[in-house]
Image (spheres, rainbow, N blue to C red):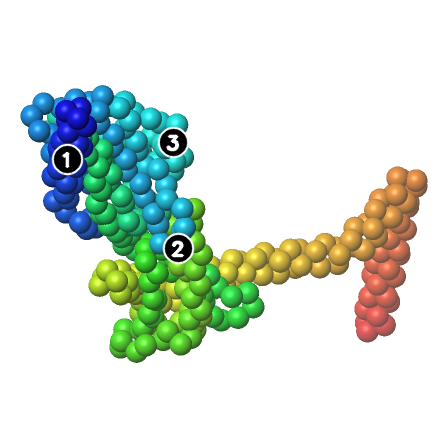
Amino acid sequence: MFQILTMLLLEMQLSMVSALFTVEVPQQLYVVEYGSNVTMECRFPVNGSLNLELLTVVWQQKSQGLSKSKEVYMLRSGKPFPLSQHHDYIGRAALLHSELKLGRAILQIASVKVTDGGSYLCLIEYQGVDYKHITLEVKAFYKKINTQVIRKPGEDKFVFMCQSEGFPLAEVFWQNEEKLNLSGSANTTYTLTTDGLYNVTSLLTFKPSISENYSCVFWNKELNGETSAHVSTSALVSTQYSRRKSLISFVIPACVVVAVLLSVLIIFQKRKPFKNGQLKKDRKRKLNPNMEDEKRDDFNSQTEVLYLSTVTASRDSGSVAL
């Protein structure tokens, strides 16, 4: 009879201790930026000194849309139990053991991903069992916008591209320097990366003017923030003009060179028959070298005869006159 009463008293004491064992969380919502580190904490009563062999700590994460939870970290009988840890958290999630003696179960996650967001369960068993839920929200601002300008082949138009990654999904607005909304002419698409980020790409086709500037604005409604990028079409037009100018400066000298070459060719063609005739004469001269001398003797003899006849005629006319 005494043993039965003792057992009943022990059970009542244990139930009272279990009822007094309560897990508390100093912060129920954590909002962190993508790529940063986060520490989440839940507290439990130690009742003096901590006996690690009696302590079990379990951290689990459940993302929205997933039915199963992920084991983030487990401490069983005061020792880590890595076999149950989900592969997404290997090397990134750790429990600060030095804080356990103070009744603080602090989970630290490094390089936070978008997929880390969700609801976390902190369960502690130590002379009783209790748990609490903590929410982690991950935000990724569209900090860097990559821009590119592409000219459409065969057309006097350009495609302006804006691309960036972030979370949650952002809207993209286009406007010119007069703040005129051009979003209706843009084509915006997105894909999901392996880290859960939205890769957003927006394209706007336009015919540039010297005085116009364009900008794309990434608006994240949930973060109430925006990021913008700008492009000056005057730079595009000046580049296009400089290309045309370079082309003209290349074509004109090329035409001059071609004209000079044609002129030289024509002159060469005209001089060719003359050279051929001269060559023929030189050949004849080589074959009959005395020909020129004979011609010269004939010419001299003819000249001499003509001279003598002229002198004779002069004399005769003088004698008649006498």
Q: Which residue is mark 1?
A: 12
What distance separates the C-alpha of mark 3 from that of mark 1?
Answer: 34 Å
Q: Which residue is mark 3?
A: 84
What distance separates the C-alpha of mark 2 from that of mark 3?
Answer: 22 Å
In the displayed structure image, the side of residue 269 where residue 64 appears, left or right: left
Q: Which residue is mark 2?
A: 65
Residue type of the residue flagged with mark 1: Met
| Quadrant assignment for the C terminus | bottom right
Q: Quadrant of residue 206?
A: bottom left
In front of the other: 5 or 117? 5
Q: Quadrant of residue 260?
A: bottom right
For mark 2, does the 10 Å Cα neighbourhood hold few (<14), some (14 to 19), or many (20 or more) residues? few
Residue at (19% x, 51% y) in the render: 29
Residue 239 position in % (x across, y down): 40, 61
Residue 267 in sight here: no
Disc 2 vs disc 1: Cβ atoms closer than 8 Å?
no
Residue 284 position in % (x across, y down): 90, 45
